[in-house]
Structures are given as structure tokens and as C-alpha cells.
Amino acid sequence: MSLHEVSNLIYQNKEKSLEILFEFLRIPTVAAKNLGAQEAIDFLKKNFKEAGFECFIAETPGNPVFCAELNSGAEETITFYDHYDVQPEDPIELWDSPPFEPNIREGKIFARGVADNKGEIICRLQAIKAYKEIFGELPVNIKFIIEGEEEVGSPNLGYFVEKNKEFALNTNGIIWEFGGKDKDGIQQVNLGVKGILYLHFHTKTIGRDIHSGYTQFVDNAAYELVWALSSLKDRNDRILVPGFYEDIIPPSEKEMEAIKDFKIKEKYLKESFGIEKFRLNLSGMELKKKYFLEPTLNICGIWSGYQGQGSKTVTPNEAFAKVDCRLVPGQNPEDLVTKIRTYLDEQNFSHIEISSWDGYPAAVTPIENEFAQKVISVIKTVYNHDPICWPIVGGSGPMYLFKDIPCVSIGTGHSDSKAHAPNENIFVDDWIKGMELIASLIDRYK
């Protein structure tokens, strides 16, 4: 019995694995449209039970969480966090093939959810099945937590964790749901996610839209909101809300070393963004410190007044905006809402309403953590190169719910997987290689 035999079995089962994946991809599990949750749960229950897992369905106020466990009586446990819901397929006219009819072209699987995150679920399951078939028993206990609302902000995952603490938190490490290789084919390891605060602003200054000839007599809602938003941040990107930065946890020496060693691809990013330079002429270490260590405040959308074709000379009575802040370790979204509210009031913007907000804090696993180092070591062995280790990524996710458990995010995507976009895809060969990685990680617990 050897890992070589496991790898051979993974390749022998390639077509069967693809059949299982394709069946899953055909289920349109769009949480934003309340589609497909029950069909996905039925699919997962069937396939995980066939693989020998004990399964249970954790009900929540929203979509249920699928849970599975393969307990071999080992001393340690690995948990895989994934999600069965996917992004909406819109705009569907930009797809080269129907989003829920998976197909293979030029070595890639195209379908909504194949990269984010159904492909990873089946990759991990098939690797475990192959290892179990060759060795008979696993040297580590395995758990799966597969939620159905990640793409709408995981509003009920906290409820699940609170109601199922023993299952959710009794583990030695969590493999998170996303990852892959960069444009140069180098594998990436993600050790944390930023927190997020999402704010909805609204103001209503006058009883109705009025003729713009009277604009000097009334408060223009659009101007009031623009002035309020401009008070939050200056043009040097410094957030002006008092106390916004005060709770940030400084990086450790190891984290600073990782940031210093991180090779940020400035030329590629500029080409990808369609720009000639970064804001404030940032580059090198200053650019990396900005990205990894500082929070953001960003206007996602703003609208007011007449939006139609041609001219309509009005002074708008209402204005709306959506703002997001990406948070770094130490920042608390609820505390920041209070600070922003207080600051707006002090700046005479009490009429600017924070109509709603949601968010959660950042979560980071130190690069020197034993579980993180185990994953990094396995990647070196399987892919024959050192991975790129991201101390924290710019996106957000509910990692914070798992408290002090080390979380490492790896996967089988690539730099043009187009997750959330039309023509989402992964390479078949990368997907199969990902099974070898999971099998090798399991084997390290022998």
C-alpha cells in the first residue's frame, strides 16, 4: 500500500469523478434566488454516505448546513469548509455554453460553481475515497462543513456554529474553500481573510424632487451625501473617522518577513486593471504593506436624482450609497459603525442615515503555525515548488467563526478561473492533481 497506488486509483477513477461532479454542477444552487438547496443536500447525502461518512443536516433560519464525518478513531481531525451555493449566472448572454450544463473544452471544465466551490468539494471527497480504498483506514478523522449561503454573506453560519459547537470547533485544522495557482502556475496558500463592514447610506432632504431653479433654497440630497462621503476619507487614502485605526493589531516579525518575501506581480496587476500606475504611485514594499496591513473604505455604488435618457433639471430629494470597508485583524465592525455614526453627527451630517449594515472581523493563521506548515510542506512535495503564501487576502469570509482553529485555504482554481463571472472554469488536470494533494495531506498524519 502506497500513495503511488492512491494516485493511480485517482487517475483510474477520473471519468467516474467527472460524472459525479457534473451531476452536482447541473443543480442550480443559487442562494440569492433561493434555488436548489434541497437538491444539493440530497446529492451530498447520497454521495457522502456511499463513501462511508456519517451525515447530518443542520437546520438554520436559512439554507441548511450539510455535515459529514469519517471518524477513524485517530488523535487528530481535519475539517473541510465548503459551500454548495453558487453565484447567480447572470449575465447569461456572456456564457459560451449554458452555465448549468457543464462541458469540457480545451482541457477545462466550464460551469457555474466549478471553481467556487463545487469542484473543491468533489475533489476532496474523491481523494478521501481513493485513499480509504487503498489503505482501508484513514490516519486522521475527517469532517465536512458545507453551507448553502456563502455567496450571500453566510448570514446563518454563526447560528450553525453556536448550535453545533462540538462538531464545528472540535478539530485541529480547517482546509478552507478556495485557492489554486497563479498565472505562472505557482500554487498559492491563503492564511487569512480580511473582515468586512458593509454600510447602506440614505438621506432625504426635501419633500420631493423640485425644479433646479429653486436649488439655492433647499438642501440637495445628492450633494449632502457626496459631502458626507468625502468627509470619511481624504485623497491620500487616509480614513478620517477618529479611532478607525486604533485597534489594529500590529503584524508579527514572521508576518512582516512573509510580506517582505511576497512577490507581488505589479506589472500583471496593472495590465489586468487597465492602469499605468497604482494610486499614490505605490510600489514595492509600500504597496505590499498597503494591501496586507491597512483597512479600506470604498464606495461601491451611489445614486440619486434623474438617471434616464436626456435631460431633466431637478434637485433630488433622496440619495443612496453603498460603502464597504475591508478590515484587518483587531478591528470590530460594530465598533466602527458607532465611530462612523458619531463622526458624521459631529460633522453636521446627522441627517445621513446608516439605513443598515452587516459585517464581521478578519481572521489570520500565523505562517509558522504547525498545521499551516504541514500544508505548505505537502504542496512542496506534490507540486515540486514552494507555494506563494498570502498572509491575508483582500477578500472576506466567515473564518472568524472558527475562533483559534488554524485555517488554510487551498484549491484547484487558476488565475483565469472567472469565479463569479461568465465562463467559470478549472483545468481537469489541476482538479485531478488536487486530489493527489488532499491524499498526500491525509498521509502526513500517519
Image (cartoon, helix red, strand yellow):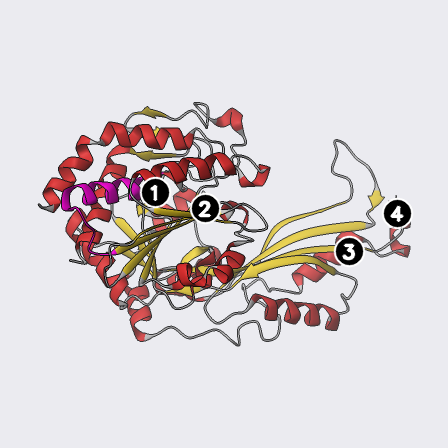
Q: Main secondary structure of the magenta part?
A: helix
The answer to whether residue 353 is above or below residue 439 is: below
Residue type of the residue flagged with mark 1: Glu
Task: Write down the residue under mark 4.
Answer: 208
Tag in front: 2 or 4: 4
Q: Nearer the viewer, residue 403 or 133?
A: 133
Task: Write down the residue under mark 3.
Answer: 203
Which disc number belongs to residue 275? 2
Specify which label sits upstream in the sequence, 3 or 4: 3
Rate crowding at label 3 as few (under 14), some (14 to 19) or many (20 or more) other CA atoms within 10 Å: many
Q: Work out how far the residue at label 2 is from the one at label 3, CA to CA, in angstroms.
A: 34 Å
Q: Work out how far the residue at label 1 is from the one at label 3, CA to CA, in angstroms.
A: 44 Å
Residue type of the residue flagged with mark 4: Arg
Task: Write down the residue under mark 1.
Answer: 120
Specify which label sits upstream in the sequence, 2 or 1: 1
- Seen in the image, is 438 located left or right of residue 292? left
> Could you say whether the residue bearing mark 1 is in a helix, strand or loop?
helix
Do residues under tags 1 and 4 come within 8 Å of each other at their CB atoms?
Answer: no
Do residues under tags 2 and 3 come within 8 Å of each other at their CB atoms?
Answer: no
Decide whether residue 257 is among the magenta residues: no
Q: Residue at x 26, y 38 (%)?
A: 430
Residue type of the residue flagged with mark 2: Ile
Viewport quadrant of the N terminus = top left
Specify which label sits upstream in the sequence, 2 or 4: 4
Specify which label sits upstream in the sequence, 2 or 3: 3
Q: Work out how far the residue at label 1 is from the one at label 4, CA to CA, in angstroms.
A: 52 Å
Q: Residue at x 26, y 68 (%)?
A: 368
- Highlighted range, magenta: 119-140
Q: Position of residue 165 (x, y in %)?
A: 45, 63
